[in-house]
Structures are given as C-alpha cells and as structure tokens.
Amino acid sequence: MATVLHAGRSARRSIHSALLWGVSVLALLLVLFLVVDILWLVVVKGAPGLHFTTFSTDTTGIAGGLQNAILGTLQLILFSALIAGPIGILGGAYMALFAGARSARILRFVSDVMAGVPSIVIGYFGYTVMVEHWGWGFSSLAGAISLAMLTLPYIVRTTESSLRQVPKSYYEGALALGLSPTTALRTVLFRPALPGILTGMLLAVSIGLGETAPLIYTAGWSNFNPTMQLFKNPIGYLTYVVWTYLNEPYDAAHQLAYTAALLLVLLVMCLHIIVRVLQRRGTDPSQLRS
Amino acid sequence: MPLLVLLVIGGVLFYDAYPAWRFQGFSFFTGIDWNMGNMYANGPITQNGVQAAPGASFGILPFIVGTLGSSLIALLLGVPVAVFTAFALVYRVPSRVAAVLSPLIELLAGIPSVVYGLWALSVLAPFVEFQLGPWLAALGHVIPYLAGPVGTGLGMLTSGLVLGVMIVPIIAATTRDLLLQVPRLPMEGALALGMTPAECLRFIALPYIRRGLFGAIILGWGRALGETMAVLMISGNADNYTPPNLYSPISTMASTIATLLDSALTDFSGMAVHALALIAVTLLIITMLTNLFARLMMQLGSRDVGVEVS
C-alpha cells in the first residue's frame, strides 16, 4: 500500500516537473519567435527600399529618400549627448564620490524614478516650456534637450556604478600623493571607469535614437536637411517617418517607413554589439588593475 | 541634478494643469466626454473663475479605462511568458546557448517603440482581426466581455498584446538576474534531499526572489502605462466612450496627449491645453508611484538575496 502511494506521488511530482519545464521552454521559444518575427518583418519589408539614393535624397512628402531624416536623427542625438553627457557624468561622479551615503541613495532613487517618467510627458513639458513659452518654435535644440532629459538618468546611473567599481584606495592614494580631487578624478578614476561610462552613453544614445513621443512636439518635422540652426527650424528624424508614413495611402511612403524602421533597428543593434564588447572589456578585472 | 529636472517638470506641469482642475474638478476623472466646446462662439464663458469655450467638458475616464485595460492585458500575458522564459534561460538552457539568447532578448528591449507599432500594424492586427479575434469571440457565449464584433484588429486587445511583448524583456532580464543570484547552497541542499529541480525552483528559489520579482513586474507595468507610440499606432484612438468589449478601439492617457495636442492648440481659451497638462500630471503621478513602489520592492528584494540588483 505504502509503495503504491509513494509511486503515485513520485509520478505526480515528475509530471509537475515536466510541466513546469515544458511551459518554460515554450515561453522561451515564443519570445525567440517574436524577436525573429519582428526582425524578419523589418528586414524583408525594409531591405528592398535600401538604395544609394535613400541616403542621398531628401523626402518629398511621401516618397524620395531618407537623407534629411538620417542626418536629423544624427544631429538630435549628437546634441542631446553633448548636453546630457557632461551633466550626467558630473552628476554620476558627484553621487559616487562626494555625496554622503544617505544623499547618494536618495539621488539614485530619484534618478531611477525619473527614468520611468513617460516620454510623452517630457515631450509635453518641452513643448509648453521651450517651444511655446520661450518661443523657440519647433527646433533642433528643443528636441535635443527633451532627449537629453530622457536619457540623463541612464547616464547618471551607469557613470555612478562604473566609478564605484574603481577601488576607493586609488582615489585616496592619489589624494595622498598630493593631487587635487578634480585631478585625481580626471586622471586616476576616469581611466578605468571609462568603458563603463561609454557603455552608459551608448545605451542612452540608443534609447534616444528610438524615441518619437518627446520629439513630435519639440522637434517638429522637416522635409529638408537639418541646418545647424538651433532655434525656429524644425528638423526631421527617422522615427517620425515610421510613424506617419505608414498611414499614407502610397506604396512609396510605406516603403520608406519600413526602410526607416530597418535603419533604426540596425543602428540599435550596432550600438548593442558595441556595448557588449565594451562591457566585456570593462568588467575584466585585469583591465581594471593595469 | 535629476532631482532638479524632476522637480522642474513636475512644477511646470502642475502650474499648467491647475486651471483645468479648477474648471472641471473631480469630474475630470469620472467624465466620459472630451469636448473642447464651441470653437466658433463669440467668446469664452467663465466657470469657477477660469475661462473655456462654451460647452467645453473634459472627462478622461475613457482614457483611464483604456490605459488600465491595455496594460492589464499586457501584464496578464506578458508576465507568465517573461517569468517562464527566465526559468528556462537560467535552469534549462546550457549556459553557452543562454549567453547567445540573452542578448537577443535584451535587444527586444532596445527596439524602438515605433518599430513595435509597425510590427503590430502589419502582423498583429491582422492576426487579431482574422484569427485570434473570431476564435475568442466564439467564447463570448461563456464570457460576455469576449463577445464580438471583432472590428478591424485595432483596439484594446491588440494594444495589450503589443504592450505585453514590450514588457517581456524588462521582466525576463530582471528575473534572470535575480535567479542567478540565488545562493547555491540551499539549492544544492534541496536537490540532495531528493527534491526535483522544479521543486527546488518553486520552494527555494522563488521565495528568495519573490519581492524582487514583484518589483520587476511593477516596473514593467509602469512601462506599459507610459508607452505612447506603439499604442498610438494600433489602439484605434477612440474618444468619448468606454470600451464595450475587448476589441473596441481605445485611447490611453499617453497616446491622447500625443494626438490631441494639435487640436487643443486651436482652443482660443487655452483650456484644452491645460486639460492635457492635467492628463500629463495624472500620468506622471501614476507612473512615479508605480516606479517608486517597484524600486522599493526591488531594493528590499535584493536585500533578501543579499546582492545589489541594478
């Protein structure tokens, strides 16, 4: 009797076990299928639109190339990195080195929460303050600042954590040798932390690359190549093409939307690969000690 | 610095939203009609000390329902998939294969939301319209809310599905990191006592990561609440009614801000813009609360495991 009961229970246990792992593997396969399906769609539908002219001509409303959008995206990202980069790195350095344990914890918490602010809220803020109230109009600077606000928390957090990974004794040793805190920071701490900081910057760039919501009402849209004008001049960007051209009733416009999506995905993938390589080098302890 | 930015954003939005609050009061959250009023009237009317176009009414209940509905569908579908994926990645797949698969899943988190919208429009919406929708609607006899008409595939179900896909990488990656940090000794001890690996997972690993897992889920929820573009492209953008069934078009709070700002600018009294600001404030508060809660849970959770989770 006892053995029969035991056999029943062990059978049930192994069924439970098999069920759990079966469902797990199915879930994994489902997720992989989704990744492949999204990439497949973008490649299959986007690749036919990739010509040399895509990069060399502007959009003409519903057809043409993507030159203005590509250059616009690059300009917006460059400017936002120039704004958010220094602020974020200095903020991260402050949190890692100079702030007390308690205030650093609070600041970290705040920047985590800020990373969760919906991008459209930042877009709305940029619109009312910069576009309307300060009278900048739809402009590259308003768009870049909105993107910078969005990406700032990521840069702060990665800078902080990569500076924290450098042993504190380095900093103390540098101070003991008579270096001023800023020089110590610049020469002793930033060198080993650099891959980590760069990783954060690249991640921030890849987030900014894919954003649309904060740009619609700050950067506007333009059919012309970006000028280096900061104010009053709207600027084009790739995500806008994906969003709006899909609703146009023309095949040429649809093609542009898919091609823009392909370019975006390719850019994001490249950035992710670079980040992987940097991370591998950054976490290598021998690198840290040399 | 982030604190300053957050305070400035919050302050400006509150300042902007205050007239709308005076105008509409609490019925802002319970009203169904979003109506900017008669744009061709001779002048604004004054109500509660603020001006608006005659007949204006700003109620965002449909947007709240749309936001909650689509994000709950996303959680319902996305969370099990994400958690089970993490189980498989950590315990079933050889670590060499997992090292290849993990970045692929993280790439899913990096794909721009407009690309998700593109994918949802060309793949998911037809799937819902012709396959999933009719199949679910056949169950409508049993569960009334599932009954048709299915419509065009642009609506709450599709929005929920795509949001579900979008939150999977966030929750899966965090769960995987948590599982990897579960101490080995209790796991091996449980195995030695004759538990099956599945029971080890259930009785040893899960209690360790419980709070962190909960935090990760809330974090994913926050993402789903604030998502704008993908939802904007596939939700069908419906105003002024609460969705009668699972397939009907909706708007979320975030997508409403994006779509209605254009028309709100034509309101000569400026009240429509203030009302949008009030939506933004509401959304900001909700997402900040969910994030606050999620981060707290994750910090407590990582204390359970004893290792810091980023």
Image (cartoon, coloured by chain):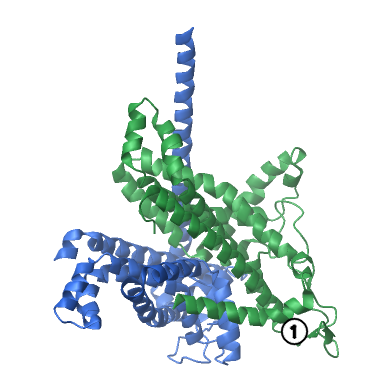
Chain colours: A blue, B green
At which x and y percent is residue B80?
Answer: 52, 44
Relative to A281, say whether A152 is above or below: below
Is residue B33 in view? yes
Is residue A30 in view? no
Within 10 Å of disc 1 (Cα), the crowding (few <14, some 14-19, many 20+) is some
At which x and y percent is residue B271?
Answer: 74, 82
Q: Which quadrant would residue A120 be assigned to in this image? A: bottom right
Q: Quadrant of the C terminus of chain A?
A: bottom left
What chain does mark 1 sit on? B
Q: Which amino acid is tagged 1?
A: Asp
At which x and y percent is residue B176?
Answer: 40, 48
Under circle 1, the secondary element is loop
At which x and y percent is residue B36?
Answer: 78, 78
At horizontal 62% and vertical 57% (from top left) the residue drawn is B159
Relative to A7, say whether B168 is above or below: below
Left or right relative to A222: residue A103: left
